[in-house]
C-alpha cells in the first residue's frame, strides 16, 4: 500500500510510460487478437485499462478524465493510446491535486469492501501491470514486436548480435 503521494507518482510515471509503449506498438489490425473466443481482445484489454482509471478513482472521490466504462472500444489503436494517455495523466494530476499523504489512509467503498486510498492506488498499478502482461502474450500471437520496459525482449538480443538467455 502506498503511504505517500510521491511513492505513487514516482511509480505511476514509470508504469504509465511502460503501458504507453505497449499501446503504441498496437496496430488497428492487431486489435482483434484474442487468446480464445471468450477472451478479451487486445482492443478490449487496452480499452479496459483506459476505462478503469476514471471508473475506479471516481469511487474514491476523484474526477479522472477518460472513457466511460460502458463505452465500447474504438477500432483505432491511435485513439486507444490517446485516451489511455489522457486518463493516465489525469490520474496523476487528480491524485497530486486532491490527495495528501494523510488522505491515503482514508477509506472508500470499493467493490463491496472498504479500501484505504493507498490500497486503491496500489491495486490500480497492479491491475494495469496484470493486463499489460496479458496484452504482451496476445501481441506476440499477433506478430507484433514487444517493447522493452523491464528488460530486453527477444528482438533486442538479436539486434545486439547476441543469443537470448537459454533459461
Image: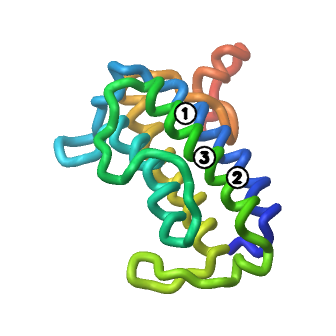
Who is closer to the viewer here, 43 or 84?
84
Which of the two labelled residues, at mark 2 and mark 3, occupies the earlier sequence position? Answer: 3
Who is closer to the viewer here, 49 or 95?
95
x and y, in percent, of residue 103 in the image: 72, 78
Q: Left or right: where does residue 31 sit relative to residue 25?
A: left
Do the residues bearing badges 3 and 1 touch, measured as CB atoms within 8 Å?
A: no
Q: Which quadrant of the rendered structure holds the N terminus?
A: bottom right
Who is closer to the viewer here, 85 or 144?
85
* Residue marked by disc 3: 88
Which of the two labelled residues, at mark 3 and mark 1, occupies the earlier sequence position? Answer: 1
Question: Which residue: 51% across, 85% down?
Answer: 114
Secondary structure at numbered mark 3: helix
* Residue marked by disc 2: 93
Do the residues bearing badges 2 and 3 touch, measured as CB atoms within 8 Å?
A: no
* Image vertical order of residue 162 relative to residue 95, above or below: above
x and y, in percent, of residue 69 in the image: 36, 53
Q: Left or right: where does residue 101 sit relative to residue 27?
A: right
* Image vertical order of residue 145 relative to residue 15, above or below: above
Label 3: how many residues lie within 10 Å, few (<14), some (14-19) or many (20+)?
Answer: many
Amino acid at each position: 500500500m502506498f503511504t505517500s503521494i510521491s511513492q505513487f507518482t514516482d511509480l505511476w510515471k514509470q508504469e504509465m510510460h511502460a503501458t504507453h509503449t505497449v499501446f503504441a506498438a498496437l496496430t488497428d489490425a492487431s486489435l482483434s487478437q484474442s487468446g480464445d473466443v471468450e477472451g478479451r481482445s487486445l482492443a478490449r484489454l487496452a480499452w479496459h485499462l483506459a476505462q478503469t482509471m476514471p471508473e475506479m478513482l471516481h469511487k474514491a472521490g476523484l474526477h479522472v478524465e477518460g472513457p466511460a466504462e460502458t463505452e465500447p472500444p474504438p477500432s483505432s489503436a491511435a485513439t486507444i493510446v490517446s485516451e489511455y494517455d489522457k486518463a493516465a495523466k489525469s490520474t496523476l494530476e487528480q491524485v497530486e491535486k486532491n490527495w495528501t499523504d494523510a488522505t491515503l489512509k482514508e477509506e472508500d467503498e470499493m467493490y463491496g469492501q472498504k479500501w484505504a486510498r493507498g490500497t486503491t492506488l496500489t491495486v490500480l498499478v497492479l491491475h494495469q501491470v496484470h493486463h499489460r502482461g496479458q496484452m504482451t502474450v496476445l501481441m506476440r500471437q499477433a506478430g507484433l514486436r514487444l517493447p522493452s520496459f523491464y528488460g530486453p525482449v527477444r528482438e533486442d538480443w538479436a539486434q545486439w548480435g547476441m543469443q537470448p538467455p537459454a533459461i
